[in-house]
Amino acid sequence: MQTLVTHSRPGIELLKNPIAGCFGNGNLPYPQERKEEMKENRRIQGTKRPDRLPSRKPSELVLLEQIRSRAACGSSHGVRLGIGDDCALLRLRAGEEMAVTTDLSIAGRHFRLDMHPAESVGHRALARGLSDLAAMGARPVAAFLSLGLPRELTKPSGRSPSWISRFYDGLLALAEAYETPLAGGDLAESPVAVADIVLVGAVPRGKALLRSGAQPGDLIYVTGSLGGAAAGLESLAELAAASEPAAKPPARPKPLRIPRDFESLLAPHLYPQPRIEQGLWLRRRGLPTAAIDLSDGLSTDLAHLCAESGVAAEVEAAQLPVRSGASIEQALHGGEDYELLFTAPSAARMPRSVAGVPVTRIGRVLRARKGSPLITLVMPQGKQPLEPHGWEHFS
Ligand SMILES: [Mg+2]
């Protein structure tokens, strides 16, 4: 297995040209500079003494090769053919079906160039997709990444590697940890940084964990702790505000300096860990009746699960595994914790932890009744409706 690229090794090097290539197939715009470079390439390649001049490949091909060699890490049992041809070829095991999920990350919407380290943007893009696979009890097979980037982000600044190189550092480190090869994608120059990731997973036919199976009387569980990502984001925003006096974000943002003692506080936001192992374990044991991952926030995601199952739910505030440093509001509505939320029959014997991650019972499933709230929060002072106040996709 190839070792990971670290900051001490050059990653994707200087691009003479904006990224206008792709590693799949694409219609490429040809800006004036690109035309000029192609002319220059032709001039160089057409010379009668090529041995006297360095051979130059179009820079998108150089970039493609660099991505390809870096993506060659991780196990690839499920990828028969990865980057380099028109399509990737994936292989499932007998009796499996495919789980496919896609997630969009947009600068200014899902991350901020002046706030989030590039490694974290790459990590989080992949973590979101992996978390969806975890929620279905699927094993990851391959990832596909389409990136649109302003050209500044493809250039190294001084001795430090380019933003895109650091983005891949973060993404590929997580890909290796979860044995998820990057098997293809696309690259283009874009006015706004945008990453669209597609994850392909596999699950035994008919065995995927769905949102729709919860029954009245089931108990509700979550993995890990809640609110850490929201608390981390709040601290990160404070750090960014303190270090950047109200100027508009620069074209090529300097990475925000994160003090050592902030790292553990920010980790749940910057580097969330998808619960792949826990999802696989739960699915193999056949314990959950329904499952979802906590991407939008407990109040919102539990409402999705209830709606799909046609049930209501009751959550006990006192049982919530609130992350230290987070508030109960952040635990209820924060989002991006990427923990698993699932239901299981009350008779099921649930372990206290799965693969080192705690599992906590937080409530129970009720029959849906007209006029009653979908979700009720049980507080020491009494019961109240819990409205979904998590992440809104069009707010
Ligand atoms: Mg999800």
Image: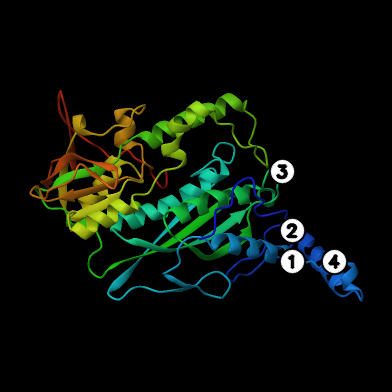
Crowd around label 2: few <14 · some 14–19 · many ≥20 (10 Å): some
Q: Residue at x 50, y 30 (%)?
A: 237
Q: Secondary structure at mark 4?
A: helix
> Which numbered mark, 2 or 3, is in the foreground of this view?
3
**Of residues 178 and 241, which is closer to you in this image?**
178
Measure the alpha-carbon separation of dots 4 and 2.
12 Å
Q: Secondary structure at mark 1?
A: loop
Measure the alpha-carbon separation of dots 4 and 1.
10 Å
Residue 46 image offset from top left, x and y in percent: 87, 75
Residue 295 image offset from top left, x and y in percent: 36, 46
**Of residues 122 and 31, which is closer to you in this image?**
122
Crowd around label 3: few <14 · some 14–19 · many ≥20 (10 Å): some
**Of residues 38 and 304, which is closer to you in this image?**
38
Instruction: Give the image's coloring scheme.
Output: rainbow
Measure the alpha-carbon separation of dots 1 and 2.
8 Å
Q: Which mark is residue 157?
A: 3
Mark 4 vs mark 3: which is more N-terminal? 4
State left or right for residue 239 relative to residue 325: right
Q: Secondary structure at mark 2?
A: loop
Crowd around label 1: few <14 · some 14–19 · many ≥20 (10 Å): some
> Which numbered mark, 4 or 3, is in the foreground of this view?
3
Q: Residue at x 60, y 26 (%)?
A: 243
Picture quarter with the C terminus: top left
Mark 4 lies on residue? 40
Q: Quadrant of residue 226?
A: top left
Q: Which mark is residue 17?
A: 2
